[in-house]
Image (cartoon, rainbow, N blue to C red):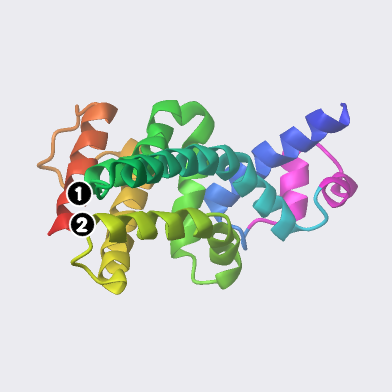
Amino acid sequence: MSEPDTKAKILKTAEELFAIDGFHHTSLRKITTKAGVNLAAVNYHFGSKESLLGAIFDRHLGPLNEIRIKRMEAVAALAEKSGERPGVEEVLRCFTEPTLALLHSDASTGYFRMLVGRSLSDPDPTVRQLFLQRVRDVLELLVDLLCQALPHRSRESVAWKLQFSLGAMSQTLTFQNHGPILGSLAKDKSIDDVIEMLTEFIVKGMEG
C-alpha cells in the first residue's frame, strides 16, 4: 500500500471510530487494527492521536471554511459598496447553506457529522478545542456581519443568539438520519425542506 493510500485509510478509519466510540475511547491500536496498518504508520503520518483528529477536522473544515468565508466577504463587500447594511438572512445563509449542504452528501460526511456533534458536547476540552480552533475565525466574521445587520443589538446578544442557532444546526446535522425525536413529526421531509425550515427558524430567532 502506498503512503497516500495508507494515510487516507488511517484518516477514514479514525473518523469512523472517533464518531462512533468517541475520541477518548478509541485507541490508536484499535484504529490501526481496523485499518490494517501498523502503529508506526500513524506515528509517521500524524505523530499523535490529537494530530490525527486535527487532520480529520482539517480535511472537512478546510474546504468548508473557505466557501463560508468567501461568501461572507462577498456580502460584506457588497454592503460597503452600496452603503447599506447586509440583511440578516443574507448573512446567515453564507454560513448555513454550505454547512447544511453536508446533509446532501451523507455517504462521505455521515461520520464527520456525528463527530462534530461529539466535539460540541464532549466534556473533555481536548476535542472541543481542536474543533473550535478551526472554526473560530469563521464564527468571528459571522458575528461581525450579524452585528452590522443588527445594529440595535449588542454584540453579546448577537453572540448568544448565534450560540442557540449553532445548537439547532448541530442537532440537525447530527441526528437528521435517525429521524425526528418527536413522533408527531412527518418523516418524509426532504433534506431541502429541512434546510429551509431550519434557516427560517434561525433567521427569525436572530431578528427577534
Q: Please give the name of the residue rendered at 41% of the width and 39% of the height, measured from the top-left corner.
A: 74
Q: Residues within 10 Å of mark 1 (few under 14, many from 20)?
A: some
Q: Position of residue 201 (x, y in %)?
A: 17, 48
Query: Which is more toward the observer, 145 or 49?
Result: 145
Q: Please give the name of the residue rendered at 54% of the width and 48% of the height, measured from the top-left corner.
A: 19
Tell me the kind of residue under disc 1. Val
Residue 33 can be seen, yes or no: yes
- The image quadrant where one finds the C terminus is bottom left
C-alpha gap between disc 1 and disc 2 = 5 Å
Label at residue 115: none
Q: Please give the name of the residue rendered at 36% of the width and 51% of the height, measured from the top-left corner.
A: 170
- The image quadrant where one finds the N terminus is top right
Q: Is residue 12 left or right of residue 43?
A: left
Is 182 magenta? The answer is no
Q: Is residue 157 left or right of residue 98?
A: left
Do the residues under discs 1 and 2 have CB atoms within 8 angstroms?
yes
Q: Is residue 200 left or right of residue 82?
A: left
Say which residue label 1 marks: 203
Q: Position of residue 35 (x, y in %)?
A: 74, 37
Above/below status of 40 relative to 119: above
Q: Is residue 4 left or right of residue 208?
A: right
Q: Secondary structure at mark 2?
A: helix
Residue 181 can be seen, yes or no: no
Q: Residues within 10 Å of mark 2 (few under 14, many from 20)?
A: many
Is 42 magenta? The answer is yes
Which SS type dominates the magenta stretch?
helix
Q: Position of residue 199 (x, y in %)?
A: 23, 42
Q: Which residues are magenta?
A: 26-45
Query: Which is more toward the observer, 189 or 16?
Result: 189
Tell me the kind of residue under disc 2. Met
Q: Secondary structure at mark 1?
A: helix
Say which residue label 2 marks: 206
